[in-house]
Image: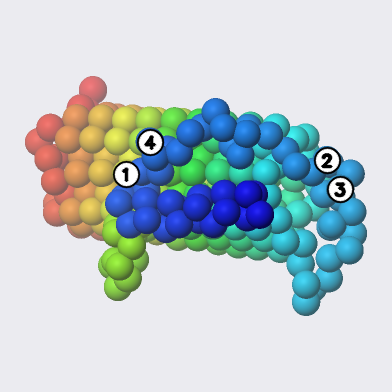
Amino acid sequence: MKRSIGIATLGLALLTITATAQDMMRHVDLSSPDMVSAEMTRAEVEAALAAATTVAPADFTGKRLSGLDLSGLNLSGAIFRAARLNKTRLAGARLDRAILDQAWLLEADLTGASLKGANLFASQMPRARLDGADLSGSRIAADLTGASLVGASIADANLGADMRNQSMGLMRAILKSANLERLNARGADLSRVDLEFAALKGSDLTGASLKGAQLGGADLTGITVIDTDFDGADLDSARLIAPIGLDRAKNFDKAKNRDRLIKQ
C-alpha cells in the first residue's frame, strides 16, 4: 500500500510539474530509494520480456530499475512509463517503439542503443549518454540537458513543440549544453527546441526545421544546412563557421540576432 501511494504521489507530481515547463528535478528527492534502487533483477526483466506478446507487451510502468545492467536486451515495444532508470546501463539495447513517457533516465547509458520510433514525452534524461544511438522517427519531448549524442541519429524525429496542444505548457526537447557533434538530424523537427550552448560541430541538419529554436551560444561549426528552415531561430552569439549549404537554407534572413553571430 505504501509503495502504491508513493507511485501515485510521484505520478501526480509528474503531471503537475510537466505543466510547469518540464522542471521536475527540483521537486523530487533524487537520493530517495525510489530514484536510486531497483526492485527487479536483470533475470526478472528478461523473464517479463519472454512472457510478453505483441498484444500484451512487457509493462514496467512505475518500476524502480535504477542502476541495473540491461545492456544488449531487446526491449522493443516495452512500456516504461514513469519508470526510474537512473544510471541504468542500456548500451546496445533495442528500445524500438518503446514507451518512455515521464521516465527518469538521469545519467543512463544508452550508448549505441536503438530507439527508433520510441516515445519520450516529458522524460528526464539530463547527462544521459546516447553516443551512436539511433532515435530516428522518435517523438522526443525530453529534457536532455548536458546529454551526449555524439554520432547519434534523430533523423525524421519530432523534437519540436506541438503548438496545437499547449494545455501542459511548452513541451519540446531541451538539449541545452548537450554534445551533439556529428549528429544526423536530417529531416528532424527541432522547432522551438532549446539548443543553447549545444555543440553541433559537423552535424547534418539537411531538411530539418529550426523554426523558433533557441541556438544562443551554440557551436554550429561545419554544420550542413541545406533546406534547413531558420525562420525565427535565435542565433545570438552562436558560432556559425564554415557551414555547408547556407546559401540553400530556408528563411535564414528571418532568423533572429544574425548580426550577433560569430563567423570566424
| Label 1 vs 3, first from the N-terminus | 3
Quick check: 44 left or right of 160? right
Contact check, label 1 and label 2, Cβ < 8 Å: no
Give neighbour class at mark 4: few <14, some 14-19, many 20+ (Cα, 10 Å). Answer: few
* Residue with the mark numbered 3: 44
* Residue with the mark numbered 4: 26
**Residue drawn at point x = 29 percent, y = 59 percent:** 169
- For marks 1 and 4, give the one nearer the viewer: 4
Q: Where is residue 116 in the image (x, y as percent from the top left)?
A: 63, 57
- What amino acid is labelled 4 in the image? Arg
Contact check, label 3 and label 4, Cβ < 8 Å: no
Rendered position, 134 above or below 170: above
- For marks 1 and 2, give the one nearer the viewer: 2
**Residue drawn at point x = 26 percent, y = 30 percent:** 217
Q: Which of 7 and 186 lies nearest the eye of the viewer?
A: 7
Give neighbour class at mark 3: few <14, some 14-19, many 20+ (Cα, 10 Å). Answer: few
- Residue 135 visible somewhere in the drawing: no
- For marks 1 and 3, give the one nearer the viewer: 3
On-image quarter of the N terminus:
bottom right
Q: Spot the residue most to the front.
A: 1
Q: Kindly report the distance in space between the C-alpha atoms of the residues bearing marks 3 and 2.
A: 5 Å
* Residue with the mark numbered 1: 194
Q: Kindly report the distance in space between the C-alpha atoms of the residues bearing marks 1 and 4.
A: 19 Å
| Label 2 vs 4, first from the N-terminus | 4
Contact check, label 3 and label 2, Cβ < 8 Å: yes
Point out which mark residue 41 bears. 2
- Residue 4 visible somewhere in the drawing: yes
Q: Where is residue 145 in the image (x, y as percent from the top left)?
A: 42, 35
Q: Where is residue 132 in the image (x, y as percent from the top left)?
A: 63, 38
